[in-house]
Image (tube, rainbow, N blue to C red):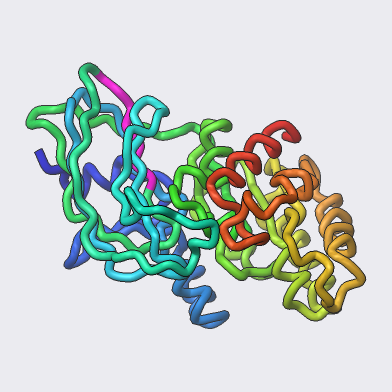
Amino acid sequence: MKLTFAQVKEITLGAVSVEQAQDGIRFYRFTDEQFAAYEKRSETFYKKSRSTSGIKLCFKTDSPVLSMSFLVDDHIGASFMAFDVFVDGKRIGSLNNFEGQEIPQRYMKLPFPIGEFSGSFELGEGEKTVMIHLPWNGFPALQQLSLTDGATVVPVKPKKKLLALGDSITYGNAAMHPSSRYVAQLCDALAAEEFNKGIGGEFFWPELPLMKDSFTPDYILVAYGTNDWRKLPRAQFFRDVKGFFENLNKAYPGIKTFVITPIWRSNLHAETDFTSIQEVIDAIREAASGRPDTTIVDGMPLVPHDISYFADYGCHPNDEGFRHYFENLWKQL
């Protein structure tokens, strides 16, 4: 029994729109207004905005088997990719292009094949909850999602929603498995639907909070600063971080907000326009402190200061690094 477009749309989480395209079903995490703004802002940012980071398919079913196929015709950044399949909260497998390969520590730039990802999974007997995590760095088209003929399909929708605004680490950059991203783990813990607006390389952008989605989130997560410290002129950063939180207050007053300051990276002693990364952290704290119901999280202790927890020797956490990120974040929250 192949699920229809209407059924797939009903079981989709984290997408602001779902489209029946010529090559399959496409999923989008940004609105048309946001896409248009990113297209003007940066060609690279626009391409990243079209990935499926944070998008999942979730449903209850009594089917003992699931089969699915996706076509991935392009990617952004790393070419390793996975579609993780969970049953009742436990990962039972994934469709990926790196299974069985020896993965070195610096795996971000290794070439992996893209194209069709297809396979079947044994789900077990009885009713269960199935969740499929789509990749953070790909542009997949769902070509078919099938269950046993006559099986039940009941959408599972979390009652809460989390809006994640951040850079590559929030986006999920370097996670071999999309379910390993710290935002995915946080949303599981909060029982919240993830709407991920992370963009690799992004800075505090004051205009972004004003381009609101159609829903009102229960939680907002903000995690920028490491790119601002590395690439922005000092004066622009102070202006932008202040403007960002002023606009966030206007757009989403009274929403519980988690603000995460930059995590450790191996080149924190590099020369920039700032006296140190601490100057960036202090400015974020000051700008965010005026927002009610805000928890400011110190990012430095989240991932161990050891390059073995990073995929590129000290900037983007690997899956083990993301595990520490979430567990230490959850303790602070």
Residue at (41% x, 50% y) in the render: 55
Q: Position of residue 75 (x, y in %)?
A: 38, 68
Q: Position of residue 11 (x, y in %)?
A: 31, 40
**Is the residue 37 above or below the residue 322 in the image?**
below
Magenta stretch contains residue 130: yes
Foreground residue among 308 and 136 = 308
Residue at the outermost right position: 275
**Is the residue 243 above or below the residue 293 in the image?**
below
Residue 155 figure quarter: top left
Residue at (23% x, 22% y) in the render: 124
Q: Position of residue 204 (x, y in %)?
A: 70, 67
Query: Can residue 50 be seen here?
Result: no
Residue 332 figure quarter: top right
Residue at (72% x, 34% y) in the render: 333
Q: Is residue 198 left or right of residue 93?
A: right
Q: Position of residue 191 (x, y in %)?
A: 52, 31
Q: Which residues are magenta?
A: 127-133
Residue at (40% x, 34% y) in the render: 157
Residue 227 figure quarter: bottom right
Query: Can residue 245 be seen here?
Result: yes
